[in-house]
Image: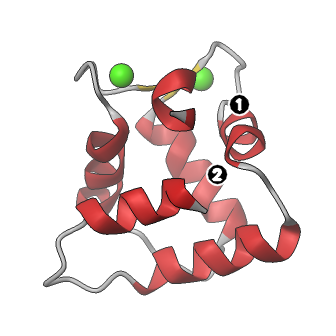
């Protein structure tokens, strides 16, 4: 799962994020590909994933985890190559 490795690599290593590991396990267990994960997260199917959509999607995958806004922003930033605050499909898949 190289995309998740990418997230892990970019997160602040001084703040261990347990839920990323759990998410990794969850995706492996369910066999969801990054593309499918993105399409699921993109609720209104407009080709971009907002922070809010990401939060909903992660909440569904990991209902017991309470992710902070700061963590979510960090994830969006780690993908957001053109810095518009949104994750486009090709930013997520690449
Ligand atoms: Ca969307
Ligand atoms: Ca973007």
In the image, residue 14 above or below residue 79: below
Instruction: Residue 50: give x, y in percent of width and height.
Output: 47, 31
Q: Residue at x 28, y 86 (%)?
A: 16
Pointer 1 residue: 43
In the displayed structure image, the side of residue 50 where residue 37 appears, left or right: right
- In this view, the residue in front, 59 or 7, is 7
Q: Is residue 69 above or below residue 41?
A: below
Left or right: where does residue 71 sit relative to residue 21? Answer: left
Q: Residue at x 30, y 57 (%)?
A: 69
Task: Give coordinates of residue 2: x percent, y percent.
Answer: 53, 58
Residue reaching furthest to the left: 14
Q: Which colour assignment does the render follow? A: secondary structure
Residue 63, position as x, y percentages in the image: 66, 74
Q: Which residue is mark 2?
A: 57
Q: Element under label 2?
A: helix
Q: Residue at x 29, y 46 (%)?
A: 78
Q: Classify the position of the N terminus by image quarter.
A: bottom right
Mark 1 CB near ligand 1 (8 Å cut): yes
**Residue at position x 76%, y 50% in the image:** 33
Q: Which residue of the protein is positioned furthest toward the right in this rendering?
A: 30
**Apparent side of residue 90 relative to residue 44 in the rendered image (left or right):** left
- Asked if ligand 1 lies within 8 A of label 2, the reply is no
| SS for dot 1 | loop
| Residue count near mark 1 (Cα–Cα under 10 Å), binned few <14, some 14–19, many ≥20 | some
Front-lying residue, 90 or 65: 90
Mark 2, Cα crowd under 10 Å, few <14 / some 14-19 / many 20+, is: some
Task: For the residues labelled 1 and 2, say whether their Cβ atoms are less than 8 Å apart.
Answer: yes
Question: Relative to 13, does residue 3 appear above or below in the rendering?
Answer: above
């Amino acid at each position: 799962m190289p995309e998740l490795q990418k997230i892990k690599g970019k997160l602040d290593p001084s703040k261990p994020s347990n839920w990323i590991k759990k998410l990794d396990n969850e995706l492996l267990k369910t066999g969801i590909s990054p593309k499918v994960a993105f399409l699921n997260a993109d609720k209104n199917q407009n080709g971009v994933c907002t922070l809010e959509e990401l939060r909903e999607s992660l909440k569904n995958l990991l209902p017991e985890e309470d992710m902070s806004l700061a963590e979510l922003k960090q994830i969006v930033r780690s993908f957001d190559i053109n810095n518009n605050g949104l994750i486009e499909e090709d930013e997520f898949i690449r």
